[in-house]
Structure formats: structure tokens, C-alpha cells
Image (spheres, rainbow, N blue to C red):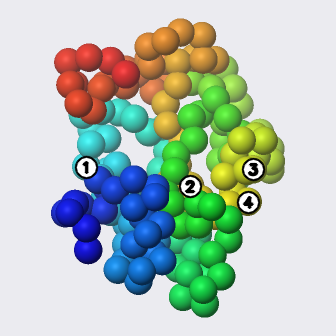
Amino acid sequence: MTEFTELTDLTAVQLLDGYRGGEFGPVAAVRAALARAEEIQPEVNAFVRLTAEEALEQAAASEERWRRGEPRGLLDGVPVTVKDILLLRGAPTLKGSLTVDPAGRWDEDAPSVARLREHGAVFLGKTTTPEFGWKGVTDSPLSGVTRNPHDPARTA
């Protein structure tokens, strides 16, 4: 494989090289990323929601494209997250606030998210954001305080 022992330690370029070389596939990378997210969530509180089922479906489709030698775009199979301030089709965008109705229509992507989708990125879920993105520290009435994963005594 590589000098790294964990798929979650790899950069996007290293993941793509691994997919291309057949060392591992997007499903393994996404499973590893989801497991890591679930492991750190209780202490770090980084996610508003994980979309594991959808992510694994996207990863399986990506893996099939790689198997056929037809990857889609520059990021096919690379796991990514989206801040809860950006629209992600199929997932509520609550903007860190209790005032946004989660029952709204969530049928479009923000332009940046659409570009990621076009290039085959796999969406793991939505990450926390300060309410309406108004400050540089991530705490909100919706999700509480998000901690720095490298030093949980600090906020993110």
C-alpha cells in the first residue's frame, strides 16, 4: 500500500493513486472515513449529520467506475464533507440555527457542492457551523460546541 497505515491519513491524491493502482477502492476509504467520524464525534462534535447509507452507495458506484477504468472527474471516490451552511441535495441545511425549518425542500446543491458532485466526490455528511456562519468559532444553538480534533481543549 503506502507508507501510511490508515486510509484516513491519506490525501486526496494518495487516495486517487490507490484507486488507480487497485490497492484499495472508494468503498474501503469511505468506510474508514465514516468509522473515524463516528469514533471522534462524541468528543469533537464535528457533524450535524452523517449520511452513511448515501455515502456508501456513492462509493460503490465510484468503485464500479474505477473497476471499468472510467472514473468521473478529478475526485471520483474521494470522501468529503460539507459545512451545514451550504446546500447539499437531499440533506437539510440548517445553518447552525434552530430557526431554520428542517422540513424544507432540499433539492439542490450549492455551486461549490455541485462541482464536487460532478467530479465524483463522495459526501459523508454535513459538518457543524456557527449560527448563520457569523463567527469564527464553531458553536451554535443547533449543535453546541465543536472541538479541535488535535486539541479537544480548544474549539474549532
Crowdedness near tag 2: few (<14), some (14–19) or many (≥20) residues, C-alpha within 10 Å: many
Which callout, 2 or 3, points to the residue nearer the camera?
Answer: 3
Q: Is residue 74 above or below residue 151?
A: below
Disc 2 to disc 4, C-alpha distance: 12 Å
**Amino acid type of disc 4?**
Glu
Q: Are marks 1 and 3 in contact (CB under 8 Å)?
A: no
Q: Which residue was labeled with disc 3? A: 114
- CA separation in Å, label 1 and label 2: 18 Å
Residue under pointer 4: 118
Q: Are marks 2 and 3 in contact (CB under 8 Å)?
A: no
Q: Secondary structure at mark 3?
A: helix
Mark 4 is surrounded, within 10 Å at the Cα level, by few (under 14), some (14 to 19) or many (20 or more) other residues, namely some
Q: Earlier in the sequence, mark 1 or mark 2?
A: 1
Marks 1 and 4: in contact by CB < 8 Å?
no
Query: Quick check: can you spot residue 4?
Result: yes
Q: Which circle's residue, 1 or 3, is located before the other in the chain?
A: 1
Q: Residue at x 37, y 22 (%)?
A: 156
Could you say which is closer to the camera, residue 10 or residue 53? 10
Mark 3: which amino acid? Ala
The answer to whether marks 3 and 4 mark residues whose Cβ atoms lie closer than 8 Å is: yes
- The Cα atoms of the two marked residues, 1 and 3, are separated by 28 Å
Residue 15 appears in which quarter of the rendering? bottom left
Q: Nearer the viewer, mark 4 or mark 1?
A: 4
Q: Position of residue 19 (x, y in %)?
A: 45, 75
Task: Please determine whether, in this image, residue 83 is positioned above or below residue 4.
Answer: above
- Residue underneath mark 1: 39
- The local secondary structure at tag 2 comes to strand
The kind of residue on which mark 1 rests is Glu
The residue singled out by tag 2 in the image is 123
Looking at the image, which residue sits at the far top?
Answer: 135
Q: Residue 115 location, x and y as percent?
A: 73, 50
